[in-house]
Structures are given as C-alpha cells and as structure tokens.
Amino acid sequence: MSALLRYLRSIDPKLPRSVWLLSAGGLANALGHGLAFPFIVIYLHNVRGFSLATAGLVLATTGAVSLLAGPGVGIVVDRIGGRATLAVALVLLAIGFGLYPLIEEPWHAFGAAAVAGLGNAGFWPSQSALLAGLTPPERRHGAFALQRVTRNLGLGLGGVAGGLIATTSDPTSFTVLFLLDAATFLVFAGMLALVPTPEIPSGDALAPGRYADVLRDRVFLGIVFLNVLFVTAGYAQFELLPVFAKNEAGVSEKGIGLIFLVNSLVITLAQLPLAKALEGRRRMAALAFMCVLWASSWLIVFLGGLQLEALAAALVFGLAGLVFGLGECFQGPVQGALVADLAPARLRGRYMAVSTISWDIGFIVGPAVGGVVLGAEPLLLWPLAAAVCLVAAAGSLALEPRLPRELRLTPA
C-alpha cells in the first residue's frame, strides 16, 4: 500500500483546486457524451437510413459551423473570459445533441449538427483558455494531461454504457443516449459556478490584440497545420471505426463499446505517468512518436478487417484502440500546453480559437473523405490514414528547430 501511495504521489500533477473542479465537470460531461459519441454514425446510417456519405457530411457539418464561428469565439473569449463563454457553449451543445432524437430527414440532422457546431466552436477555446489561465505555466502540461484523462475516462465508461443501451432494433434506445448526453452538458455548465475566473493580466498584456498578430506567429501556424493532419488521419477516423466494425466485420454494439473502453482505459492509466516521463524531453519528438503509433493502429485495423469477423475482429480492433490511445497520451501533455505557452495572455482566446479551428478542419475533411472511402472501398481507408500519419510524424520533426529554444522541452 505504501508503495502505491508513493507512486500516486510521484505522478501527482500538483494542480490548483480550481483545475480539479474544472476537470470534474469535464468528467461528468464526457461520461454523457461517451454514451452517444460512438454511435452517431450507426444511428444516422442504420436507424435513420441515411447513406454513409450523408452521415459523414452530418459529422462534417458540426466541424464546418465550428470553423466559421471560431474566429468570433476567440474575440469573445479575450473580451469576456473563458468561463462565461464556456457556459454558453455548453448550453448550445445540450440543445444540439438533444435534437438528435427528433431527426427523421437529413435536413433535421444537418440542423442539429449546426447547433452543436456553434457550441463546439465555443467549447474548446474557452475551456482551454480557462484551463491555461488557472494553471501556472510550469504545470500546464500536467493540467492538459489531466483534462485528457478525465475526458477519456468519461468517454470510455460512457461508451460501455452506451453499448449496453443502444440497439438498432429499438430506435428509442438512441433517444435515451442523446438525452443523457444533453443533460451532462447542462451539469457541466452548472459546475462552472464553483470555478473562479482567472486573474486578468495588467499592463502591456492588456494591449489590444488582433488576429493579424496571431497569423504572424509562423511556428504556431506550423503546429496548427500539423494538428489538421493529426485530426484528419487520427481522431476523425477513430470516429468511423464503429461503423466499419459493425458493417464490415459484424462487431456488435457491445463490442464497439468495449473497443472505446479499452482506448479510454489506456489513456486513463497511462496519461499521467507518461506526462511525468515526458518532463524534460522533446515535445515535437513526442508528437512524431504519437503519429507512428497511430499509423500502427490503422494497419492493425486493416489486417483485422481483412481476415476476421465478430468477436475476433472486436478483439483486434480493441488492440488497435489500445495502441491509438497510447499515442494520444503523447499529445495530451504536449500540444495544448505548447499552444498556451506560445500565446500572449491578451491573445490567448484567439490562439485557442485558431487551434480549435485546426481540429474543426480535421473533423470536416476526415469524416467527409473517410465516409466516401468507406462507402466505396472500406479496407482502403486504413492504409491511407496510416500514410498520412507518417507524413505528420516527419512534419513534426521538421518543425522542431523553429520552436523557441526554451519551449522545445516539456517543463520539468
């Protein structure tokens, strides 16, 4: 027992109480979102009868609306703060996902996705700016790692519960998922009352800022471009894995939930120890290694889909989810903290908004292209995604010499 306590103390990220409160709200929200998130494409395709291409475009709509609204959100965050912006974003997300049970025609789905996109546009920049403002610079990698832990723990547990609830033979089971998802967004909004507003910087830090100042930061723009590749070839394709597993390999909804649980448990268990291990090590090398792990996971999916079905396929896809989750652990302590370190306090909202836009672009391109490829030649998707991941790995190493020397290593 004493050895376990010593180990837990060794990986303690030493964060302020306010950061733990914010993470607790994120955990509650992620638990609800995990109920519905893995089953959105299955719901649209198998329950509502939309084509895979249409279902992919619905997912892309959320990203497209978020992309268009993102620049305005950055200005709002810089003016009124992350906490107030986050509260509004959570309400919009609750409305958007709460509308999914009412979908009967494709335009209904696009409308619900658009409302969710508005909420998504505000969610990540405001939460990231609030997290960065509440955390000392030398502990930000730990804060973003904790955020990744709580989010993935919630998504994993929610995914398992969603797999036990959802069944394509009973459309009302999906109604339960989406309404619970909407409720947890509102729970998170309520918990923000317990989170203080970060101190406002004074002096030159309050000088007026513009997006032109952000766009002159070439190193930051390089990180943004790389993240587009990360999301397109990584996270966006992980969203399409459930429908591939069900329709091409006969994996059940329960099996899909377990795939997401394995992925989330890996992140939950490995994230904080890896964040500690990365202290004093090269940030861009960590991102490159992440891409190599992701490429490996997609090749595992390719081989499993080529030869296996049902339970055997679910086990192999679970292994792919494990490898993918391990890769995510390398991004958690690196990217968000690096963006926060590059951003002047007066421009933090704008920097976080542009960073979020890179996720939005990836979630537009990834599902749209991936849905088309899945509909035409399902097995081709995975080696293509692996190849893009390897390109992103090379790009990460190429960008490293351009980073300010003091930011090349994770703070120790």
Image (tube, rainbow, N blue to C red):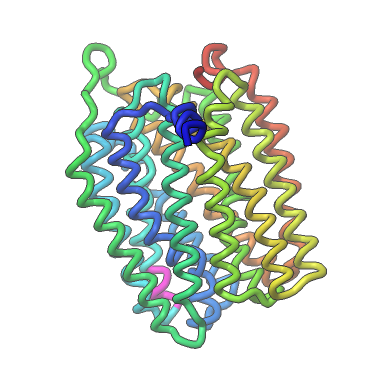
Residue 380 vs residue 328: left or right?
A: right
Res. 104 visible in picture: yes
Q: Residue at x 51, y 32 (%)?
A: 3
Pinpoint residue 164: horizontal percent, then vertical percent: 48, 74
Q: Residue at x 67, y 48 (%)?
A: 323
Magenta residues, dominant SS class: helix
- The residue at the far bottom in this view is 169
Residue 146 vs residue 297: left or right?
A: left
Res. 337 visible in picture: no
- The residue at the far front in this view is 1
Residue 165 vs residue 187: left or right?
A: right
Pinpoint residue 251: horizontal percent, then vertical percent: 65, 74
- The residue at the far left in this view is 193
Is residue 243 shown above or below 209?
Answer: below
Q: In this rendered view, identify the residue nearer to me: 26 or 396.
A: 26
Dividing the picture into quarters, in which one does residue 177 lie? bottom left
Tally the marks. Answer: 0
Q: In this rendered view, identify the residue nearer to me: 380 or 291.
A: 291
* Residue 410 inside the magenta-drawn segment: no
Q: Residue at x 64, y 51 (%)?
A: 322
Is residue 323 shown above or below 249?
Answer: above
Pinpoint residue 5: horizontal percent, then vertical percent: 45, 33
Q: Which residue is drawn at 42% across and 69% down?
A: 110
Q: In this rendered view, identify the residue nearer to me: 261 or 38.
A: 261
What are the residue bounds of the magenta stretch? 106-111
Is residue 69 shown above or below 287?
Answer: below
Pinpoint residue 13: horizontal percent, then vertical percent: 42, 29
